[in-house]
Amino acid sequence: MTTPARNPAAERPAVKSHLAQVFAQYPMEIAHGEGVWLYARDGRKILDFYGGHAVAGLGYGHSRWLAALERQARQMSFQTNALPIAVRERAAARLVKFTGLGLDTVFFINSGAEANENALKLAFKITGRTQAVALEQGWHGRTAACGAVTWGAIEKWYGFPRTPFDVSFTPRDDPGALPRHIDRNTAAVIVEPVQGVGGAFDVGKPMLEALRRRCDEVGALLIFDEVQCGMGRTGAPFGANYYGVTPDMITSAKALGNGFPVSALMLSRRVAREIKYDDMGTTFGGGPLACAAVEAVIDAIESESLLANVRQVSTYIRAHCVIGPVTGVQGAGFLLGLKTSRPAKEVQSALLEKNILTGTSADPRVLRLLPAYILNEGHVDQLCDALSKIPA
Ligand SMILES: Cc1ncc(COP(=O)(O)O)c(C=O)c1O
């Protein structure tokens, strides 16, 4: 989770809030959004490079997405998975085609953690093994299983008396270390091809290829957690496409529904062959509104050439944003980390004063950008201009 710029305690409203106080709060209240712009109650217009934490891939109020949700809500707002509905089949077929990797079985659920939880469970069930491997600095969610494979969770917030399985963490940039961690006890390796919370860190093709090879050698299943980096954010459908490495399972959420809660677990044929009735289940997952949102997101990405836009504008950011306190850029597409010469939180605060919203990360010297795929070069010019006025 990214941390806002200011001390949350100081920002708490005078009126008692009945919400659990577990999130640090940005110092503004958003009234509405349009495209890449946020409009605050106090009248400020803020350029959003944070995208609701990587969710608002199409930006706010996208007409195709709005129309699809309205149409679906009128036609059939909810129906259980036990009753076939066309929009669910269409969304799954659309996602499989968009992904284009031969992972042609889809299970819809509601959140990133739920998708990862199911992926891990299947890996343990299928292999009959007892251990998972994850990467240092990786982030996979807040449930018992996802927290177990999230770097630093046990020390920071885990809370459960024990993890449900053994976990070994391997360095994120050392293919040579893999044989020490991944062996015939390993059910699954879970990895974000581009780490989000870890600082928009590009794990990279050689490391992903080494993971694929090692998993094949020992019979472990490879899971790409693409909750943050997938669904177009790299400028390719998924990180798997971007790097040319195909895992056994991909999890997707965040931009998948552009704000309507939905996640997906995509399975290779090898994995799909092993599942049977009742292995997984959900009430809300695969609901008609969620599926209509998925269809609309893919429609918009394809018909508006948004992947090409992500690639082009990402290149522009790399070329122009190393300015002021920014010393370099890492990551891929629209999951970028601006490396900063001073604490990223200070740069984030200074940008917010200039009405530009960005994210931070677990790396105190990385400012994270997660903008909507409709961002253009003019918006980047505004960011560069603001950065150039912040002392290095
Ligand atoms: C890579 C990654 N995986 C999983 C999750 C968990 O997703 P959710 O909060 O939807 O459960 C996140 C959330 O930030 C994430 O970035």
Image (cartoon, rainbow, N blue to C red):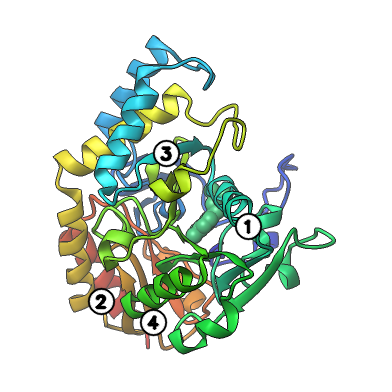
The three-letter code of the residue at mark 2 reads Cys
Q: Nearer the viewer, residue 138 or 322?
A: 138
Judging from the image, what secondary structure is the residue with disc 1 in?
A: helix
Q: Image point 71% across, 55% down: which residue?
A: 144
Find residue 261 and report its horizontal and vertical position in percent: 49, 37
Residue designated by label 1: 146
Looking at marks 1 and 4 on the same chain, the residue that comes earlier in the sequence is marked by 1
Q: Image point 24% across, 72% down: which residue?
A: 385
Q: Distance between the Cα atoms at labels 2 and 1?
A: 34 Å
Q: Which of 91 and 260 is in front in this view?
A: 91
Find residue 36 and report its horizontal and vertical position in percent: 30, 49
Q: Image point 64% across, 70% down: which residue?
A: 185
Residue designated by label 2: 321
Residue designated by label 4: 339
Residue designated by label 3: 106
Looking at marks 3 and 1 on the same chain, the residue that comes earlier in the sequence is marked by 3
On the question of residue 349 being in view, the answer is no
Is the residue 276 above or below the residue 392 in the image? above
Image-quadrant location for residue 376: bottom left
Looking at marks 4 and 2 on the same chain, the residue that comes earlier in the sequence is marked by 2
Determine which of the numbered discs, if any, sits on residue 218 in the image. none
- Taking the image as shown, residue 361 lies to the left or right of residue 247, namely right
Looking at marks 3 and 2 on the same chain, the residue that comes earlier in the sequence is marked by 3
Q: Image point 27% across, 60% down: which residue?
A: 241
